[in-house]
Image (cartoon, rainbow, N blue to C red):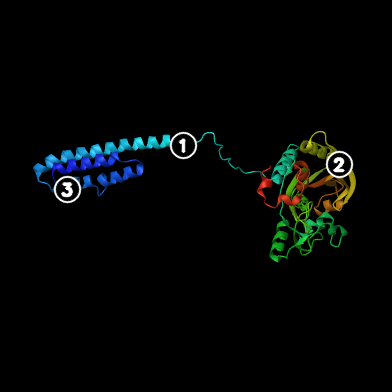
Amino acid sequence: MTESNVNKIKNSFLKDAENVKDLKSLEQVRVKYLGRKGELTAILRSLKNLPIQERRRVAPKAQQLKKELEETITKKQKELSTFNFQHSVLSIDVTKPGHKIKIGHIHPLSKIEEEIRHVFLSMNFSVVEGPEIENEYYNFDALNIPKDHPARDGWNTFWLKAQTDAEQTQRAAEKIPRNSASSPRKSALLLRTHTSPMQIHYMKNHQPPFQIIVPGRVFRYEATDASHETTFSQMEGLMVGKDVSLANFKFIIEHFLKKLFGSEIEFELRPSYYPFTEPSVDVYMKWRGKWLEVAGAGMVHPKVFEAVGYNPYEWQGFAFGFGLNRLAMIKYKIPDIRLFYNGDLRFIRQF
């Protein structure tokens, strides 16, 4: 190993470095000379085998060359990095429209439910939720719709296979005596047909006065068309106290409709029938020149109070319910209820 070997490596390196055009080829040059098996690395490792006099001559030159090679490579890296950056910037067409970033959208049912929640929370209502799988007692019997009552035909029910263990667990949780007159008869399970069962759940565990709303999905076995679906969303309302009347309901529903649809809205209450309220009314709203039914309501029936252990001569209250789908269709001009559930993102992106 002589000084001429070191000079030969230096000349070869300078020639290779001069022809480098990108960072990848520069890395190849670095590995060729300074890598673990590089040419200069081999010389540095062989120094220990040289005679002492020759080692003193070659070692400083080899170390100096290593330093020069490293400095040259570092300098070349900076030059190529700067060039690549400037080249990439210059290649950008700043007049070309950028790609639109797609963001998520709130589902119209979620949107209107949130609006309605805020309206009722501002009137000191509490928001509670209930189970979607109910039993016959809570969905019908306790709401003054006993077995074979003709009103049951109005709720096209999805009945579920009885679950004996689940029935016993729910009976124990509700603390209903097995032989109680108000006890469910085998508690046939079903998908709730309305949110009204939560009235019974809540009143069994709370003492009045109170005022609540109950949003949630309900299920009915119906033919699907532009205004009917097997799954849809409702919101139930209940207010119980010593001096609660339809006048209180009229004020609340008026405030609600004006907040949701505008202060110029017109509405009226028309007589109706529901087994769990007496008297019962339907709420009609004038929208774009047409009268539309938007809610059902009435004073809580004494039989319902008796089912939960309230004295109907001491307490009175009103209940109301409306479909979130229907309100959303009116407010957002949605022509077909099936659009809520078909998963078409073109529909969702409009909200």
Left or right? Give the position of 86 relative to 247: left
- If the image is split into quadrants, where does the C terminus sit? top right
- The answer to whether the residues at label 2 and label 3 have Cβ atoms under 8 Å apart is no
Decide which of 130, 87 is in the foreground and name it: 87
Tell which of 305 and 178 is nearer to you.
Answer: 305
As helix, strand or loop, the secondary structure at mark 1 comes to loop
Count residues near mark 2 (Cα–Cα under 10 Å), then give few for <14, some for 14-19, many for 20+: few
Q: Which residue in the structure is indicated by mark 1?
A: 91
Instruction: Tell me which amino acid carries mark 3.
Output: Ser
Regarding residue 268, the answer to whether it shows in the image is yes
Tag of residue 191: none
Residue 168, located in which quarter of the rendered image? bottom right
Q: Is residue 92 left or right of residue 257?
A: left
Q: CA separation, marks 3 and 1?
A: 49 Å
Read off the residue under disc 2: 290
Q: Nearer the viewer, mark 1 or mark 2?
A: 1
Q: Amino acid at mark 2?
A: Lys
